[in-house]
Image (spheres, rainbow, N blue to C red):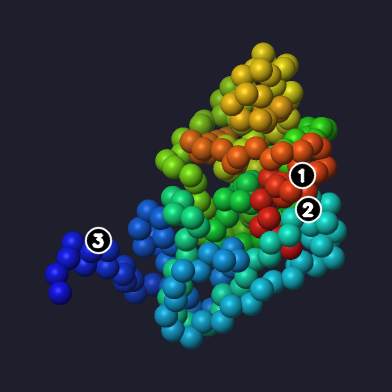
Amino acid sequence: MRSALFSAENLEKESAQPGMRLQNSKMLKIELNGEAMARVGSMVAYQGQVQFQALGSGGIGKFIKQRLTGEGVPLMKLSGQGDVFLAELAKDVHIIDLEPGDALSINGSSVLAFDSTLSYDIKMVGGAGMASSSGLFNCVFTGHGRIAITTKGTPVVLNVDAPTYVDPQAAVCWSANLQTGYHRAEQLGLGTLLGRSTGEAFTMSFAGQGFVVVQPSEEPPVMGSGAQQQQQQGGLLGGLLS
């Protein structure tokens, strides 16, 4: 049988070392030898002896925060030995290595998988004193390990060396040490423009020294207002944690 489908670029990528790596630009491969965490529903194939366990709230503190943020879709724990392939709606996949002392704030809807050695917590975006359809919460990862994130299209990494403003629905992740806030679009002279193009009444601001990753796409606006919007869309955490 012959076809360009069977070319080398489409064959499974092999490695002698366990862990996560890119199978291609839109699929993650975890060569599992122990445990890893992944987004529920992201598994597209696996080989070997692998168990999948839906996780609970991860402790009473996270349970309370989950109720406050409206998050409702749990993670799953992968355990065993084998190869697990993960993807999310054909989005682009990127791998980030966290070193001890690093801290990454991330929009939870962009998290695909991460090493079980990493810790995470739900945090309120600084200065978020008003309701927004994108929500007011994000997830902060710390520790030593790898995390795989997704973007809708090729992102841009902005060096925050001047006050920076981003549509909350386009912000993927950013340095956790940055000072963040929410600003009404009208204060920036963008109220009418943003209201017509994205449905967002607010922009996120970033200040300090660090970076912010912005994707060239936005989640569709949610109909409704205030708490109803926040409940439907699940906040910046995007339904990652339960």
Label 2 CA crowd tier, 10 Å (few <14, some 14–19, many 20+):
many
Q: Earlier in the sequence, mark 1 or mark 2?
A: 2
Q: Say which residue label 3 marks.
A: 9
Of marks 3 and 1, the one in the foreground: 1
Q: Say which residue label 2 marks.
A: 70
Type of amino acid at the residue the image marks with label 3: Glu
Task: State whether residue 189 is above or below residue 117.
Answer: above
Quadrant of residue 59 within the rendered picture: bottom right
Label 1 CA crowd tier, 10 Å (few <14, some 14–19, many 20+):
many
Confirm or deny contact between disc 3 and disc 2 (CB under 8 A).
no
Confirm or deny contact between disc 1 and disc 2 (CB under 8 A).
yes
Quadrant of residue 239 within the rendered picture: bottom right
* Residue at the limit of the structure toward the left, as seen here: 2
Label 3 CA crowd tier, 10 Å (few <14, some 14–19, many 20+):
few
Distance from the alpha carbon under mark 1 to that under mark 2 = 7 Å
SS assignment at label 3: helix
Confirm or deny contact between disc 3 and disc 1 (CB under 8 A).
no
Task: State whether residue 89 is above or below residue 230.
Answer: below
Question: Can you say which quadrant of the picture contains the C terminus?
Answer: bottom right
SS assignment at label 2: loop
Q: Earlier in the sequence, mark 3 or mark 2?
A: 3
Residue 12 image point, x, y percent: 31, 69
Q: Say which residue label 1 marks.
A: 230
In front of the other: 130 or 223: 223
Task: Give the residue at x 56% y 75%.
Answer: 78
Task: Give the residue at x 54% y 58%.
Answer: 112
In front of the other: 105 or 220: 220
Type of amino acid at the residue the image marks with label 2: Gly
Distance from the alpha carbon under mark 3 to that under mark 2 = 41 Å
Type of amino acid at the residue the image marks with label 1: Gln
**Could you tell whether 189 is left or right of 148 in the image?**
right
